[in-house]
Every structure is written in structure tokens, then in C-alpha cells.
Amino acid sequence: MGFYAKHRWFRVIIGIISGIIIIVLIAVAFMRIFPAFGGRPTKAERKNYSQRAGYYDGRRFNYPDEWSIEGIGQDVRVSSKGTAPKDELPVKFPEIDEDTDINDVRVTWFGHSFVLIQMHRMNILVDPVFSQRSSPVQWIGPKRFTVPSVSAADLPHIDVLLISHDHHDHLDPDTIREIDSKVDRYIVPLGIENHLERWGVSPDKILNKAWWESETVNGLEITCTPGRHFSGRSLIDQNYTQWCSWVLMDEYHQIFENGDGGFGGHFEEIHDRFGDFDLVMLDCAQYDANWHYSHMYPEESAMAAEILGAKVVMPIHWGAFILSSHSWDDPPERFTIAAEQRGLNIVTPYLCETMDPDAHDKYQERWWRNYE
């Protein structure tokens, strides 16, 4: 009887292990086949990345050790509100005027890191996401708590679309398909071109860039600059693509958009190369002690703004999704306090409000304090 019992348990264990293996294989196959997870670089493309990127090992991108400095070690939260607001947050209607002077700058923040920059008589769109969830599928995943006042169809013609990295809250295939007909060109960090092509974007419209590589479009210089983050749209493609921040520069203004990332020595290196910035847009949310290296605390964002010589700074990466456990308003509240202590000019426009950074005094209302 003991012999049969032992073998029966042995068969049960083998069955469980086999079941787990089958589930894992199905999951891997799903992540390879389902288009939302994007594409992968070929061997020839990986060789090209190795020649252009100093911190690519032939398979994965890395953050330089020499920039891995410590920021602020404590996550001291100031808000006790929920991760999503109880109230309906105010959403303005953008004033997108395409008949502007060449020295004008207008910025419209649609929530999270979705920004329209009107500069040098061009429309530059950054990390657009219209979908209801930050997820490869729309039936599960973090759900947005604010909806832009405009749809993809309402957007103007887009001269340049910039992507900072390939996480779902920054790169959304449904949005890309919706707006592709409006877009002249995409400028993306290395590897993201494969995602776009899999979703139907013509390769002729895509330019990929390594850190410090630039592209001049109608007189506007756009430079791919470093960040401290990671990439991947599934569990099996971590750091296969590059992540980055962006510098936009013409003879009138210089703008920095951080995308997403942790604190590090790259901010000082960027300032050494470019000098002070007229406007800095910095992520200040989705932080947690468990992934501190890849997401700044708000106090670190304020410190980064000071390092970058920001004449005006705007907190982003909040106001639409919560991908962490902090309160929905903890990021702007902490950032504002820290930035004011450093004597920085902070602008906090409403969602979808079009802002003129040269008139930063008009965008001082800390509006989130009026909502639960």
C-alpha cells in the first residue's frame, strides 16, 4: 500500500510540474504572438545598437555605474487621500493655436507624461496615451481616473512624435494606430522602432536614436539624452530597448522632457552639455522604495530641476494613472513644497490646459488641493 501511495504522490507532483510548464509556455507564446507586446530587434539591429550605444551588451541596455549616485533615501508621504480621487478632477479644453510665431512655445499637458509641445512653429507630441488602461489588454490593468477633454481625432497635425520608452503607460498601440495618419515622423530610442513597425507604422517615418544622438527638424534640434530607468513590455523582454529623456532646442528656447526615471548623475552630465533650460518637465510620481532606482521621489525631482538650471519647472507623470501605492496627489504636493524650498519657478497647469512657460506667473494655482 505504501508503494502505491508513494507513486500516486509522485504522479501528482509530476502532474503539477507539467501543468506549470504548460502554463509558462502558453504565457511566453502569448507574449510573443500578441501584437500589443511589440516587436524585437534582429541580430543585425543588435549589432547596430552595440556600435552606437556605449551601455549595450549586445542584448540589453544598462545604466552606467558611474552615474549611479544616491539621491534622497526616504519616501515621506504627505497625503492620506486615496490612490484615485473621489472627486471628478477639473479638465480644461486646450487652446491649440497653430498660427504662432517661430519664437512662441505652448505646452499642453494631458495627464501622466502625455504632452503636446508647440515650438518652432511645429507640434511635438510626447508619450501619448488615450487608452483607459495602462496595460497590453483593456480588460485588466491600472485604470485612468481622468479622461482628456480631446480625442485622438481632435489632435492637430503632428510634426514629430517622441517616445521616451516602451512601458505601457508611455507607449500605447491603440493610440499609435489612431493618430498615425496625423504624424509626419517618429523619433524614438533604439529598439522601439520594432514595436511601431509591428503596429503598422511605416519604417520610412521612424528615426531611432542612441543617447546623445540628435536630429534637426525644420531648424529644431531634438537630442536623445540619458535617463535612469528600464524597459520592456513583457516579462521576457526586459531592457531590450533603450529608454531616454529629450532635449528640444532652437535659437529661442531650450526644453527638457524627462519621460520617466530615477535620480542619477546623468542630470549633471546633461546640464554640462546643454546648460540651463527654459522649461523642464520632470516626472515626480509612481515611486516606491522597492523600485526607487527607477522612479524619483518628488524631492529628488526638485533637486534634478535645480541641477538642470530650470528657469521654469513642471511636474508630470501624475494626474491620470496610479501605478504605485501613493495617494493620487502626493506627487504634486511634495514636489511643489520641495521646489519652492529651492526657489524654483513651478507651474502647475490644469489637465489639458495650454500653458505659455514665458508667462509662468499665470499657472500658479495648486488646484489639486481643492479635491478629494
Image (spheres, rainbow, N blue to C red):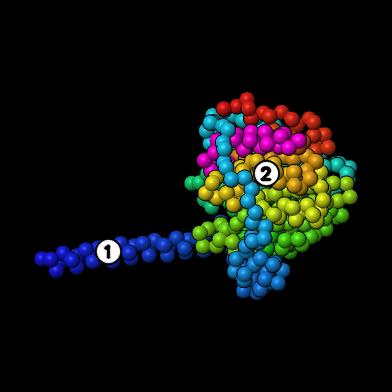
Q: Is residue 314 left or right of residue 278?
A: left
Q: Secondary structure at mark 1?
A: helix
Q: Is residue 288 magenta?
A: no
Query: Is residue 201 something that shows in the picture?
Result: no
Q: Which mark is residue 301?
A: 2
Identity of the residue drawn at 52% across and 40% down: 325
Q: Nearer the viewer, residue 90 or 266?
A: 266
Q: For this rendering, which residue is in front, 334 or 51? A: 334
Residue linked to disc 1: 13
- Quadrant in the picture for residue 16: bottom left
Q: Residues within 10 Å of mark 1 (few under 14, many from 20)?
A: few
Label 2 – label 1 distance at C-alpha:
50 Å
Viewer can see residue 367: yes
Where residue 118 sits, quadrant-wise, is top right
Left or right relative to 85: residue 269: right
Disc number placed over residue 330 in the picture, else none = none
Q: Which structural element holds mark 2?
A: helix
Identify the magenta region.
321-343
User: Mark 2 or mark 1: which is in front?
Assistant: 2
- Residue at point 68% right, 63% down? 190
Q: Residue at x 81, y 53 (%)?
A: 274
Quadrant position of the C terminus in the picture: top right
Counting from the top left corner in percent of width and height, residue 310 is at 78, 43
Q: Residue at x 65, y 50 (%)?
A: 263
Specify few, some or many for label 2: CA neighbours under 10 Å numbering under 14, 14-19, or 20 or more: many
